[in-house]
Image (cartoon, rainbow, N blue to C red):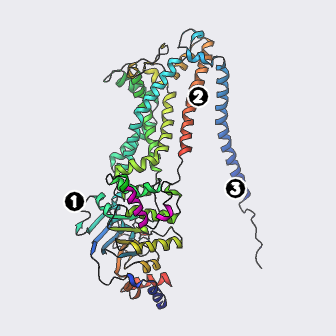
């Protein structure tokens, strides 16, 4: 006689309840986060609706609500974030490549560098603002309240994140690929350049875009670094922009939102919507890159 | 047991037994490798000969892969690895001050256990070695790719899709692509670490035939867990095992026996060899 076959679960009812409860808790956590975001978004769009339109883009910041826009802030943001990307990408990816592919992990200085990068990633951006004020805006560099000051400071802000996410992308490239290249006589540099970096490129760009998009939303350090609210001209095209005074979207939001007049709050909300749209665009690009180049090894 | 060993010898191709000894290409004398404080394998004496296939066999963890990785200095990639003893290529110290690891690897190619084609086209996989080792014209590359793929018995299957991704190939085809890639740099020695362990019997037979066909041009060293395979393809066999080290509780690999495959399998000199071989067949 064989025992009848049964597929009825033998896990105790208590455990199943606990499992269900835990799962419920997780859904609730996700729900709260998404819900808050949605409410904020809808509220902001509603509030800013009267001002969302071409006039917002066409006009420059002004103390008169009827004529106030954000054109110079949009271009200022593009310049500052663009330069930040240009500076932080090579530096960050280079550092990540050094740490992952060249540095000897058993050396004390490698561990010191790693520890420092982890810690720097957690430093509040206002601290970088103070640093930038002392060493870049004034002090040794003395660049004043210019776009290059803002970009260099923001580069310091996002650099740790770029390094950490690039390292993760490099680590995701299977060692067998490196071994295959090295076994064919490739040098470390050839291996990195021809196999590892192409393999890690999607991960690096995704992580870097997300890191750089942080620079787009930063206002604290730039308020310290002399970003001005009422800039009635765009940064000049070309290298002269580096030395131009500037404003950026977060500063504009800060300026308009803290004004006592109700009309300015509407403009602030509309500016937030523009800022969010740019952020979503960047994050969307990151997701698109990730999906497009998702690799199977 | 006796029957098993006799069966085995029938598997062995008589034709592949060299009438005379071929010249030695690589030689290990008193080779020992440690990972940090742990000595993985010690005092290995081996001679690798041209036109012969040398099989490294033995239980898991006895250091076969470790020894194999010494031959083309792949152990350099392991930070904790330390190599002692002497390893020579045509009498030149592979770990000597004048030896460049890249140059060593160009002369001593390697095929890995798991097929590891680059996520590029079939063509680019084969051309990679040539590209990193100096520029060549398009025509030269084309010719090299075809010759190498023919050499690895893969040409007819892929000649119409050289630009397709190497990852679209089957596992057995990928492994032959890795062989093509390795022979494209025209090495003198070919190291293979369990090249068939990820393959089905048909693909395995393909690779074995291939090894047999190309051994005229290379000195081949193959690690295998498959006794039949060692008996079928190899001319010489090195049997490793582990023994408890004098101090510490981890086991260190040692070379027990090294000789002509026919001898090692039919009349092993050491009883540990006999026990391992018969155990694997019995
Ligand atoms: N990178 C490494 N770092 C530390 N120890 C290692 C490393 N590689 C191998 N070892 C150790 O060295 C010993 C020999 O390993 P090796 O891989 O050479 O054995 P093997 O004979 O190839 O085994 P298998 O048949 O399972 O492949 C093992 O004890 C293993 O744990
Ligand atoms: Mg092994």
Where disc 1 sits, the SS reads loop
From what the image shows, is residue A272 above or below residue A14? above
Q: For the residue with label 3, is its CB less than 8 Å from the closest atom of ligand 1?
A: no
From what the image shows, is residue A114 above or below residue B187? above
Q: Chain of mark 2?
A: A
- Residue B233, horizontal then vertical, whole percent: 42, 78
| C-alpha separation, residue under disc 1 versus residue under disc 3 | 66 Å
Marks 3 and 2, the one that precedes in the sequence: 3
Q: Residue furthest top?
A: A64
Residue A277: assigned label:
2
Q: Which residue is mark 1?
A: B98
Q: Quadrant of residue B221?
A: bottom left
Q: Which residue is mark 3?
A: A15
- Residue A278, horizontal then vertical, whole percent: 55, 28
Q: Residue at x 72, y 59 (%)?
A: A12
Where disc 2 sits, the SS reads helix
Q: Residue at x 37, y 86 (%)?
A: B263
What is the span of residues highlighted in magenta in the rendered image? B141-160
- Residue B236, horizontal then vertical, whole percent: 36, 79
- Between label 3 and label 2, give the one nearer the viewer: 2
| C-alpha separation, residue under disc 3 versus residue under disc 2 | 45 Å
Q: Quadrant of residue B245?
A: bottom left
Badge 1: residue crowd in 10 Å (few <14, some 14–19, many ≥20): few
Q: Chain of mark 1?
A: B
Q: Is residue A4 left or right of residue B173?
A: right
């Amino acid at each position: 006689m064989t025992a009848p076959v049964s597929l009825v679960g033998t896990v105790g009812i208590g455990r199943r309840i606990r499992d269900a409860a835990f799962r419920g808790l997780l859904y609730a956590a996700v729900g709260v986060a998404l819900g808050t975001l949605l409410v904020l978004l809808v509220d902001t769009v509603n509030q800013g609706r009267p001002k969302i339109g071409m006039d917002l883009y066409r006009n420059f910041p002004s103390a008169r609500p009827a004529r106030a826009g954000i054109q110079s802030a949009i271009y200022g943001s593009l310049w500052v974030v663009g330069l930040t990307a240009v500076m932080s990408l090579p530096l960050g990816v280079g550092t990540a490549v050094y740490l992952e592919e060249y540095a000897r992990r058993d050396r004390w200085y490698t561990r010191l560098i790693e520890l420092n990068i982890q810690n720097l990633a957690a430093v509040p951006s206002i601290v970088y603002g103070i640093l930038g004020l002392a060493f870049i805006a004034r002090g040794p560099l003395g660049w004043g309240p210019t776009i290059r000051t803002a970009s260099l400071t923001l580069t310091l802000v996002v650099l740790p994140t770029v390094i950490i996410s690039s390292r993760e992308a490099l680590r995701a490239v299977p060692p067998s690929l490196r071994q295959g290249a090295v076994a064919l006589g490739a040098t470390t540099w050839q291996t990195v350049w021809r196999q590892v970096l192409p393999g890690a490129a999607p991960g690096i760009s995704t992580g870097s875009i997300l890191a750089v998009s942080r620079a787009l939303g930063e206002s604290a350090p730039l308020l310290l670094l002399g970003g001005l609210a009422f800039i009635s001209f765009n940064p000049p095209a070309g290298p002269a922009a580096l030395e131009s005074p500037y404003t950026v979207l977060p500063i504009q939001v800060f300026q308009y939102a803290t004004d006592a007049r109700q009309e300015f709050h509407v403009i602030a909300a509309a500016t937030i919507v523009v800022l969010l749209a740019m952020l979503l665009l960047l994050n969307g690009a990151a997701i698109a890159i990730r999906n497009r180049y998702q690799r199977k090894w | 047991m006796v029957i098993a060993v006799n069966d085995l010898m029938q598997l062995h191709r008589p034709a592949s037994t060299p009438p005379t000894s071929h010249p030695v290409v690589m030689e290990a004398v008193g080779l020992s490798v440690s990972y940090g404080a742990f000595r993985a394998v010690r005092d290995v004496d081996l001679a690798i000969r041209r036109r012969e296939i040398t099989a490294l066999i033995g239980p898991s963890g006895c250091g076969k892969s470790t020894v194999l990785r010494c031959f083309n200095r792949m152990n350099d990639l392991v930070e904790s690895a330390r190599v002692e003893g002497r390893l020579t290529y045509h009498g030149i110290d592979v770990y000597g001050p004048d030896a460049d690891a890249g140059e060593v690897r160009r002369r001593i190619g390697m095929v890995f256990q798991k097929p590891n084609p680059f996520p590029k086209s079939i063509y680019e996989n084969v051309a990679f070695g040539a590209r990193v080792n100096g520029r060549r014209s398009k025509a030269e590359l084309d010719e090299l790719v075809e010759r190498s793929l023919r050499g690895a018995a893969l040409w007819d299957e892929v000649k119409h899709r050289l630009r397709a991704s190497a990852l679209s190939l089957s596992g057995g085809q990928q492994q032959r692509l890795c062989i093509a890639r390795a022979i494209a740099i025209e090495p003198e020695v070919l190291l293979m670490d369990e090249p068939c362990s990820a393959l089905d019997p048909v693909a395995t037979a393909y690779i074995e035939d291939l090894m047999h066909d190309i051994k005229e041009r290379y000195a081949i060293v193959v690690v295998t867990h498959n006794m039949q395979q060692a008996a079928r393809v190899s001319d010489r066999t090195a049997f490793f095992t582990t023994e408890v080290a004098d101090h510490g509780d981890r086991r260190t690999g040692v070379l027990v026996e090294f000789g002509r495959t026919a001898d090692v399998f039919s009349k092993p000199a050491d009883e540990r060899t006999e026990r391992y071989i018969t155990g694997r067949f019995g």
